[in-house]
């Protein structure tokens, strides 16, 4: 057993056919949203994409719908009765319609791709004009380093774009990397914790509709709560205190909407200014275009038309596209964060058991020792690598004597399958699991 290679005889034909079918099945098993490197959460099979803090939507909806329900139930119908038909019936109807619209645009803001830029599998090729070469020791080839920024022209003006080391690309103009979602987002405005999503090119108009409709709803409830108190005071000839005592919900809603309107109203006013000047929140706080020309400003009317009336560009990423573990770029582009433990085992087991019959490879882990074993077309060569007994002995031997070799080969194949499955489960559950290939050559 000492110094013997792990695989000297070919594996059984049935074992090869099983693993080959598993490799082909891996192509149709997982989709991009299941192995996406970002921190996003997906629903409806990748059709809805949320940020990692998507649970905050529940709080946002509660803060909107709870006072609205109180207004509709205890104030609006009473105001409708005091005003009389036909105008009175419009009070609760308008409140409910604006509330439904508010929730719809909230979902459209939070549940869609904000404009995520697709990652690169490898850094871009360095240009001779932009890259710098540093000499390497020992006469080796110099190592190329990419410049941190590049100059691009936007409407005749020079704009610097930065290199993103996470996504391995030069970000397009107005693009920034969101540290919360771990994605580069086109026309990045900010990451909004109230909607649990980045605000970018593809959902900014819905975000503006959300905050503006919320502001209108606050002012609407605030105004008609005062109307209710005024009508109660006039009907029963009581003062303001008596009217509040008769309708305490109106007093609560006045105080609540007064505070809320300052927040969402100020936010709406600020973003109205940004829309008219064609800025983003990120640009306004980081770059401050005061004192220098904004290359994206085309005038207030054109800026408003660009935000609200221009077609929304399609998503740059098909999150429902199928991913093959055998794709050489898959290891660099995807990882198993969003998958369940069962899916992790399935994905990486099938990826590791994809065979090239000209050069088959097996990635194994025996205890703490990582061993990468590769064979030629007949599995007879292991590039001179020997498994030392000082580290770990194989649990089974396939060389125990003539006449028993065929049975031992099948036993060894079964052991390999069981060991590989256990290893994948262990690495799938680990938080600091490696990205790309699971095991490296020792």
Image (spheres, rainbow, N blue to C red):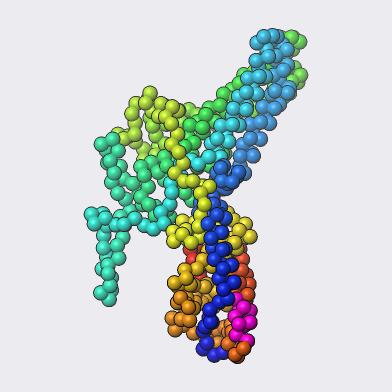
**Viewer-closest of 15 and 156:** 15
Left or right, 420 with respect to 290, comes to right
Q: Is residue 276 above or below residue 240?
A: below
Q: Please report the bounds of the magenta region as a residue range.
A: 404-413
Residue 95, given in percent of the width and then of the height, sits at: 64, 22
Task: Work out whether 437 lies above or below 207.
Answer: below
Q: Position of residue 389 (x, y in %)?
A: 55, 87
Residue 239 seen from this side: no
Point 52% across, 76% down: residue: 370
Q: Which residue is pictured at 57% across the width and 73% down the height?
A: 13
**Residue 315 seen in the figure:** yes
Magenta stretch mostly in which secondary structure?
helix
Residue 206 % position (x, y) = 51, 32
Would residue 409 be counted in the magenta stretch?
A: yes
Whether residue 293 appears in magenta in the rendering, the answer is no
Q: Quarter of the image holding residue 96?
A: top right
């Amino acid at each position: 057993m000492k110094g013997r290679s792990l695989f000297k005889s070919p594996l059984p034909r049935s074992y090869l056919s099983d693993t080959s079918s598993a490799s082909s099945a891996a192509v149709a098993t997982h989709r991009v949203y299941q192995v996406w490197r970002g921190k996003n959460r997906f629903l409806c099979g990748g059709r809805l994409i949320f940020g990692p803090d998507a649970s905050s939507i529940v709080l946002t909806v509660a803060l909107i719908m709870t006072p609205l329900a109180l207004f509709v139930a205890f104030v609006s119908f009473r105001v409708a009765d005091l005003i009389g038909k036909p105008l009175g019936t419009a009070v609760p109807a308008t409140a409910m319609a604006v509330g439904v619209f508010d929730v719809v645009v909230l979902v459209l803001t939070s549940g869609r791709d904000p404009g995520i830029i697709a990652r690169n599998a490898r850094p871009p090729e360095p240009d001779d004009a932009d890259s710098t070469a540093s000499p390497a020791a020992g006469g080796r080839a110099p190592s190329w380093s990419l410049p941190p920024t590049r100059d691009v022209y936007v409407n005749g003006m020079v704009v610097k774009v930065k290199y993103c080391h996470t996504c391995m690309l030069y970000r397009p103009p107005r693009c920034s990397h969101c540290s919360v979602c771990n994605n580069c987002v086109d026309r990045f405005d900010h990451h909004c914790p109230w909607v649990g999503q980045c605000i970018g090119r593809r959902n900014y108009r819905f975000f503006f509709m959300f905050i503006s409709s919320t502001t209108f709803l606050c002012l609407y409830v605030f105004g008609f709560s005062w109307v209710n108190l005024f009508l109660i005071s006039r009907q029963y000839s009581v003062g303001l205190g008596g009217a509040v005592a008769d309708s305490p919900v109106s007093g609560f809603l006045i105080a609540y909407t007064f505070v809320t309107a300052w927040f969402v109203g100020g936010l709406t006013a600020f973003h109205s200014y940004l829309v008219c000047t064609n800025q983003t929140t990120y640009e306004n706080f980081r770059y401050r275009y005061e004192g220098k020309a904004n290359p994206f400003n085309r005038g207030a009317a054109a800026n408003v038309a660009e935000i609200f009336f221009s077609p929304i560009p399609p998503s740059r990423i098909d999150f429902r596209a199928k991913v093959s573990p055998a794709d050489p770029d898959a290891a660099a582009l995807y990882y198993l964060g969003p998958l369940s433990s069962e899916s992790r085992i399935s994905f990486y087991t099938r990826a590791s058991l994809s065979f090239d019959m000209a050069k088959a490879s097996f990635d194994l882990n025996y205890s703490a020792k990582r061993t990468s074993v590769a064979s030629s077309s007949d599995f007879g060569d292991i590039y001179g690598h020997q498994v030392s007994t000082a580290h770990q002995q194989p649990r089974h031997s396939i060389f125990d004597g003539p006449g028993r070799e065929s049975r031992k080969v099948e036993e060894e194949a079964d052991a390999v399958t069981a060991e590989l499955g256990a290893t994948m489960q262990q690495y799938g559950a680990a938080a600091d699991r490696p990205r790309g290939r699971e095991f490296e050559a020792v």
